[in-house]
Image: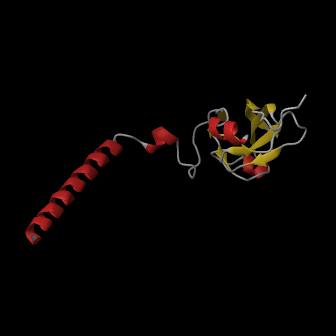
Amino acid sequence: MVNLRCGSLKGTSLLMIAAMALFAIDASAQSVTDKCGPAHVIPLTTPEPPAKIVADPPLAGPLASRGVVVIQYCVQNIHLAPVFGAGATAASPRVGHLHVSLDDAPWVWMDASGNPVIIQGLPPGPHKVLLQLNDANHHPLDQVTVSFVVPGSAESAPHH
């Protein structure tokens, strides 16, 4: 019985080695640089393409069930970092951050986390969030507006 277990383990080990070899062949055909761009630790030698921000509409589940706005976004050709000032604008690859505003408010908040923007406690009705991608000196590079409606509840509806 011991020999059968060892034989079974050897078969399992051979299967694992074959699977790892197959994965390595598949992975070697793809380049991380092709998928994600150049490493953010090596200065670029060619001009960078324009920075861009892309955002999805708020996640439907949290918005419908709890009125929580979760906006997922990604940036391209820029690294989000809490780095500011004239020296930071010379960094390569470029660094920047977001200015986030709600419903055309005169104030903004800054974010350099790359995490989704999450807002709760908004009154029912239409709203919009402006995500503005900025360089280290707060100069706008790109922007996207996400519009949505926070659903009303039976409790918040006016009674006539």
Residue at the bottom extreme? 2
**Residue 134 locus on image (x, y percent):** 75, 40
Which residue is more in the foreground, 13 or 59?
59
Q: In which quarter of the image is the C terminus?
A: top right
Q: Residue at x 58, y 38 (%)?
A: 46
Which residue is more in the foreground, 120 or 139?
120
Q: Which residue is drawn at 78% across and 32% down?
A: 128
**Residue 104 locus on image (x, y percent):** 86, 33
**Residue 7 locus on image (x, y percent):** 11, 63
Q: Quadrant of the N terminus?
A: bottom left
| Figure colour scheme | secondary structure
Instruction: Left or right? Give the position of 141 relative to 43.
Output: right
Instruction: Left or right? Give the position of 142 relative to 108.
Output: left
Q: Which residue is drawn at 81% across and 34% down?
A: 124
User: Residue 97 lies in what quarter of the image?
Assistant: top right
Count of numbered badges drawn on the protein:
0
Q: Evaluate whether residue 97 shows in this view.
A: no
Instruction: Left or right? Give the position of 17 relative to 132.
Output: left
Instruction: Left or right? Give the position of 147 relative to 10.
Output: right
User: Residue 105 lies in what quarter of the image?
Assistant: top right
Q: Which residue is drawn at 10% across and 65% down?
A: 4
**Residue 87 locus on image (x, y percent):** 75, 51
Residue at the front extreme? 160
Q: Evaluate whether residue 30 shows in this view.
A: yes
Q: Is residue 104 shown above or below 3?
A: above
Which residue is more in the foreground, 75 or 150?
150
